[in-house]
Amino acid sequence: MASIRRMSTGRQCTRPGCSNPAVATLSFNHQEATAWLDDLAKESHPSTYDLCKRHAGHLSVPRGWDLRDRRNLVPDLAYTA
């Protein structure tokens, strides 16, 4: 019988002290006072932050900012034998 397992990227959460696997990428634009939370980007970038499930789920932005959660919350599953 096949088991279901989440794909691992090998990247960790960028929050200090957290070593959990990253599942989302945070980016923002100061001029627009907007932050975007997306599914984990294929590659890391110096102007974005990778977050684990816990930190992505409890993210808050400064007062007056808009947080746009664009994640696909349906799990990306891989079937392995």
Image (cartoon, helix red, strand yellow):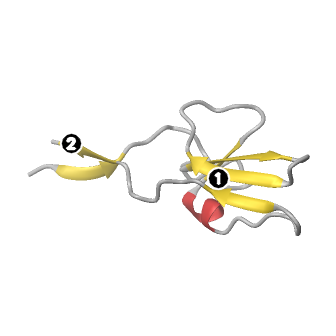
What is the secondary structure assignment of the residue under circle 2? strand
- Which amino acid, by three-letter code, is at mark 2? Thr
Task: Identify the residue shown where x is 54% and y is 54%.
Answer: 71
| Front-lying residue, 51 or 63 | 63
Q: For this view, does 18 lie left or right of residue 80?
A: right
Q: For this view, does 23 lie left or right of residue 1?
A: right
Q: Earlier in the sequence, mark 1 or mark 2?
A: 1
Residue 16 visible in this rendered orientation of the protein: no
- Which amino acid, by three-letter code, is at mark 1? Leu
Label 1 environment density (alpha carbons within 10 Å; few <14, some 14–19, many ≥20): many
How many numbered discs, if any?
Answer: 2
What is the secondary structure assignment of the residue under circle 1? strand
Q: Residue 75 has which mark?
A: none
Q: Position of residue 57 (x, y in %)?
A: 61, 66
> Taking 59 as reference, is 20 above or below it?
above
Q: Which residue is mark 2?
A: 80
| Front-lying residue, 38 or 44 | 38
In front: label 1 or label 2: 1
Task: Identify the residue shown where x is 64% and y is 32%.
Answer: 44
Rendered-image quadrant of the C terminus:
top left
Q: Position of residue 35 (x, y in %)?
A: 75, 53
Task: Identify the residue shown where x is 73% and y is 60%.
Answer: 67
Q: Position of residue 33 (x, y in %)?
A: 86, 54
Residue 66 visible in this rendered orientation of the protein: yes
Q: Which residue is mark 1?
A: 37
Q: Position of residue 68 (x, y in %)?
A: 67, 58
Task: Identify the residue shown where x is 59% and y is 64%.
Answer: 54
